[in-house]
């Protein structure tokens, strides 16, 4: 039988990953008697975890929300995800929580074991933030891949990996990793491709099996101001499905601040500007233009006009018309 502290941690892990546990099933998973299980539950309560018990033959246990936040148990990948999320918030990507995110991030990293702290510190040090916006939502990167690439960037170690292109073609790559870039909802690796003898950016969610080859290299000079600029220039030059052109009744500087670098804003006069952007999805420009809080007119494409009209109809249906008053008798 595991010692008491190890068993208690195991019990906590089970309670955190399951909404409700029947008592007999939980005791069986821990390989203890119901009496021992009750003692372990009491021990968790003494530590501040609000464990609720349901009495009776079919009784069981579940972890409820408490008045204060007790220590949490997370695995390595969850810890990496937590740090990445806090880093996004700290960089102002979530409005109004930057200062509290700095404090939370410091606390989380401080209590991490050395092996895990090494991983998350590499991500923090080797990531160049881009502007938040525009990218289409997709599956996030594998934390193991993200940290392996970050460590190779930090240690200036050449990296081998398999990369899947947009058309599904897979190739083996050998590269000198430079920096990670978080741009939109995507992560990218900026690296010097040793096979193609040129700089490349690789989407992390398309990169598999990264392994350092044990050889070090002297970092090369990027052809742009920084890694984020390199990735943005590549994204801007990619072929897109839609070219957006819109007139907005708002000052150019205001629109630039709201759109960031995801649209080209040209001033017409003090109260109007012209916005153009390339995109694969009409959802992003529809949402962005609506968030400006200003009137606008779509010049092209016609598909965007229909898309906005469709959104408007759905919003209108979300607010039912008031009931007709009863007819006077």
Image (cartoon, rainbow, N blue to C red):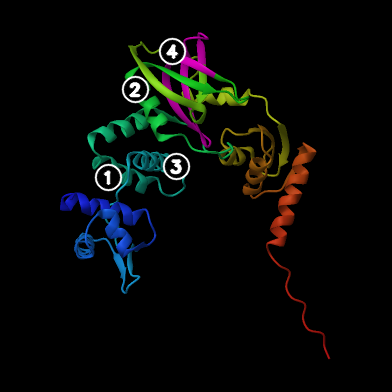
Residue 299's spot in the image, x, y percent?
Answer: 78, 37
Q: Is residue 246 magenta?
A: no
State which quadrant residue 247 falls in.
top right
The 10 Å Cα crowd at callout 1, few under 14, some 14 to 19, many 20 or more, is: few
* Vertical placement of residue 17 versus 131, above or below: below
* Vertical placement of residue 198 versus 248, above or below: above
In terms of depth relative to the viewer, which is nearer, 183 or 34?
A: 34
Q: Say which quadrant the C terminus sits in.
A: bottom right
State which quadrant residue 60 falls in.
bottom left
Helix, strand or loop under label 3: helix
In terms of depth relative to the viewer, which is nearer, 46 or 291?
A: 46
Of badges 2 and 3, nearer the viewer stands 2
Helix, strand or loop under label 1: helix
Q: Which span is picked out in magenta?
A: 171-199
Asked whether the beta carbons under mark 1 and mark 4 sit within 8 Å of each other, the answer is no
Q: Is residue 186 magenta?
A: yes
- Give the residue at x 50% y 31%: 205
Checking the image for residue 292, the label placed there is none
Asked whether, in this view, residue 3 is left or right of residue 231, the answer is left
Distance between mark 1 and mark 4 Cα atoms: 35 Å
Q: Which residue is mark 2?
A: 154
**Most prominent secondary structure in the magenta stretch?**
strand
Asked whether the beta carbons under mark 2 and mark 3 sit within 8 Å of each other, the answer is no
- Give the residue at x 76% y 50%: 309
Q: Which residue is mark 1?
A: 107
Distance between mark 4 and mark 3 Cα atoms: 28 Å
Checking the image for residue 92, the label placed there is 3
Q: Which residue is mark 4?
A: 221
Residue 142's spot in the image, x, y percent?
Answer: 44, 34
Distance between mark 2 and mark 1 Cα atoms: 23 Å
């Amino acid at each position: 039988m595991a010692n008491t502290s190890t068993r208690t941690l195991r019990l906590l892990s089970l309670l955190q990953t399951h909404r409700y546990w029947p008592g007999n099933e939980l005791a069986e998973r821990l390989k203890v008697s119901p009496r021992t299980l009750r003692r372990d539950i009491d021990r968790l309560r003494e530590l501040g975890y609000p464990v609720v018990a349901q009495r009776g033959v079919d009784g069981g246990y579940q972890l409820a929300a408490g008045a204060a936040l007790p220590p949490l148990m997370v695995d390595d990948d969850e810890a990496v995800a937590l740090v990445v999320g806090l880093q996004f918030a700290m960089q102002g990507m979530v409005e109004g929580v930057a200062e509290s995110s700095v404090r939370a991030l410091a606390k989380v990293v401080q209590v991490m074991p050395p092996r895990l702290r090494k991983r998350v510190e590499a991500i923090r040090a080797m990531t160049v933030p881009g502007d938040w916006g525009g990218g289409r939502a997709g599956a996030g990167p594998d934390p193991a891949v993200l940290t392996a690439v970050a460590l190779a960037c930090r240690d200036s170690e050449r990296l081998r990996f398999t990369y899947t292109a947009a058309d599904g073609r897979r190739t083996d790559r050998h590269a000198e990793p430079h920096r990670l870039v978080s741009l939109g909802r995507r992560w990218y690796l900026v690296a010097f491709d040793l096979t193609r003898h040129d700089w490349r950016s690789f989407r992390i969610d398309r990169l598999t099996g990264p392994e350092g080859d044990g050889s070090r290299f002297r970092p090369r000079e990027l052809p742009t101001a920084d890694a984020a600029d390199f990735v943005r220039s590549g994204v801007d030059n990619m072929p897109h499905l839609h070219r957006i052109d819109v007139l907005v009744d708002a000052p150019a500087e205001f629109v630039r601040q709201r759109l960031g670098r995801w649209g080209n804003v040209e001033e017409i006069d003090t109260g109007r500007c012209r916005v153009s952007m390339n995109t694969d999805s009409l959802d992003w420009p529809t949402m962005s233009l609506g968030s400006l809080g200003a009137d606008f007119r779509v010049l092209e494409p016609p598909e965007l006009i229909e898309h906005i009209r469709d959104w408007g109809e759905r919003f209108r249906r979300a607010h039912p018309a008031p009931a007709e008053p009863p007819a006077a008798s």
